[in-house]
Amino acid sequence: MNSVLSAITGHAAILLAVVAILEGVLAAWLFRRNDEMRMQLRRARDAADEAARTAALAAPGGIDPEIVIQLIRSGQSPTLDAVRTLMDQRESADGAADAGEP
């Protein structure tokens, strides 16, 4: 037991350096992995936006694809009722803006 303790205390600086190197390698790996995940998330978000646009354009009644994307990004489910409500709100706001113009 004493030999193990004396080996640890005698080589404390070397052990600390090894731990620091391992920590640096792990941190570099985690940073790289984080960047990869961020890129995958960006690609997935772009694919989801494209799918939402395509689905909105294929839906009956001329649903605005930007409203569907707005609902998805806000975390709400893009149901027909929610889309219609936002479309009605946007149309009434556009109508009020057009009525206010000289």
Image (tube, rainbow, N blue to C red):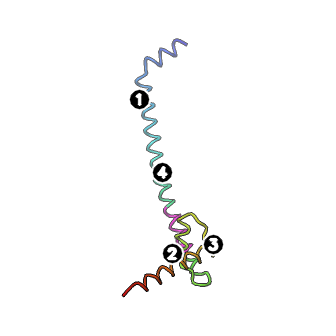
What amino acid is labelled 3 in the image?
Thr
Q: Which residue lies furthest to the bottom in this view?
A: 102
Q: How far across and down, in percent of the image, does residue 26 sit?
A: 47, 40
Q: What residue is shown with label 3?
A: 79
Q: How far apart are marks 4 and 3 (CA)?
A: 33 Å
Residue at disc 4, secondary structure? helix
Residue matched to label 2:
66
Q: Are marks 2 and 1 in contact (CB under 8 Å)?
A: no
Nearer-N-terminus badge (2/1): 1
According to the picture, the residue beneath numbered tag 1 turns out to be 17
Spatial separation of the CA atoms under disc 3 and disc 2: 14 Å
- Asked if labels 4 and 1 touch by Cβ distance under 8 angstroms, the answer is no
Q: Residues within 10 Å of mark 3 (few under 14, many from 20)?
A: few
Residue corresponding to mark 4 = 34
- For marks 3 and 1, the one nearer the N-term is 1
Question: Which mark is first along the chain, 2 or 3?
Answer: 2
Towards the viewer: 9 or 71: 71
Residue 101, by quadrant, is bottom left
